[in-house]
Image (spheres, helix red, strand yellow):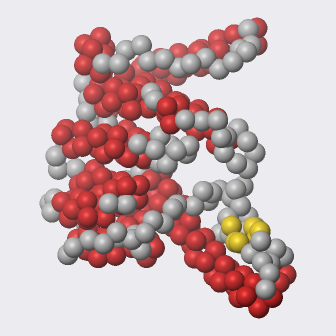
Amino acid sequence: MSRQSLVRTPAVVVLVALLMAGAGSIQRIREARYPEGAVAEETLYLTSGATLQRLTAGYNALAADLYWIRAIHHFGGVKLRLTGAVPGGVELVAAPTDYRLLYPLLDITTTLDPKFNIAYRFGAVFLAEAFPGGAGRPDLAIALLEKGLRARPDKWEYMQDIGFVHYWWRHDYQAAAGWFERAANVPGAPWFLKSLAATTLAEGGDRESSRTMWQAIRESAEIEWLRNDAERRLTQLRAMDEIDELQRRSDRVTAASGRPVSDWSEVVGGIPVDPTGVPYELEAGRVMLSRSSPLFPLPAEPQRMLTSP
């Protein structure tokens, strides 16, 4: 039975909805009567996707959907706890092992349904995103996407995404360009991948090449979430440009006065805000993005790596 026919079967949809609603009600009653003193450690009892394939028989697609929901719940719960525990900041008592179940859940999901496109593409972002906003495991993100390629060797989007992981999180522009080139050679792939490969190889690490890459991701994304994430990254780059300009102005005032400035009135008229409307911060002459901004934290800009043509 295909994923499309299964998901569209009314009886199955109604049954799943009723089960989820009932589980939610039972959980609320339980929490009201027996409040937890501490968060229980999440455990994955079945770690083999092949075993689950046998156990779920002809309902592998439905089982994949349920494990995908669990993966999202795990990622969202850990991220909220780590990044939302301290208002406007990040909880310091944290370790990358908090996301330890993320890859196993995604691996099970994609074993149950090897063509689960969203699980590969979203899952790779969840894994690659720097800790604590994500698992900080670009290696596992690449492994997941390569697994997807074994199931769908002609899926140029997975090749583009692998290049994207190499570019954004590993800062390996040679590898990124190679994957963009490989994606470009797939029949039906968009024309811009060729130019993206050339730009990455020549100017990897440059902010303008980053902007070009994210614009390409935004234009080619099949999924709205990925388009929105690309738009956010482009907005971060705009904020970085603004911070650079404000920093130059602050440095000029500091050089003229002989002391670091801490008041915006000495630098610009009014209080400048980032593209989301949150005021920038100025401390001892240093311009910074507010930790309360939706754009925080800004991506790191490593020293540009030299690559051979």
- Residue 122, position in %: x, y? 41, 44
Quarter holding the N terminus? top left
How far from the left and from the top, in percent, is residue 257? 81, 88
Q: Is residue 227 left or right of residue 40?
A: left
Q: Position of residue 237 (x, y in %)?
A: 53, 69
* Lateral position of residue 214 relative to residue 236, left or right: left
Task: Report the residue at 73% width, 42% height from top.
Answer: 86
Q: Quadrant of residue 286?
A: bottom right
Q: Position of residue 112 (x, y in %)?
A: 29, 25
Q: In the rendered image, which quarter is residue 18 located in?
A: top right
* Camera-side residue of 73 and 16: 73
- The foreground one among 141 and 24 is 141
Q: Which residue sits at x=39%, y=71%?
A: 304
Residue 246 in view, yes or no: yes
Residue at 34%, 40% in the rendered image: 140
Q: Quadrant of the C terminus?
A: bottom left
Q: Taking 190 as reference, is 45 above or below it? A: above
For image coordinates 73% across by 50% down, the residue present is 88
In the rendered view, tell whether residue 16 sits above or below residue 153. Answer: above
Is 253 drawn above or below residue 225 in the view shown?
below
Answer whether residue 7 is visible to the viewer in this image.
no
Which of the pair 196/191 is nearer the observer? 196
Observer-nearest residue: 172 or 8? 172
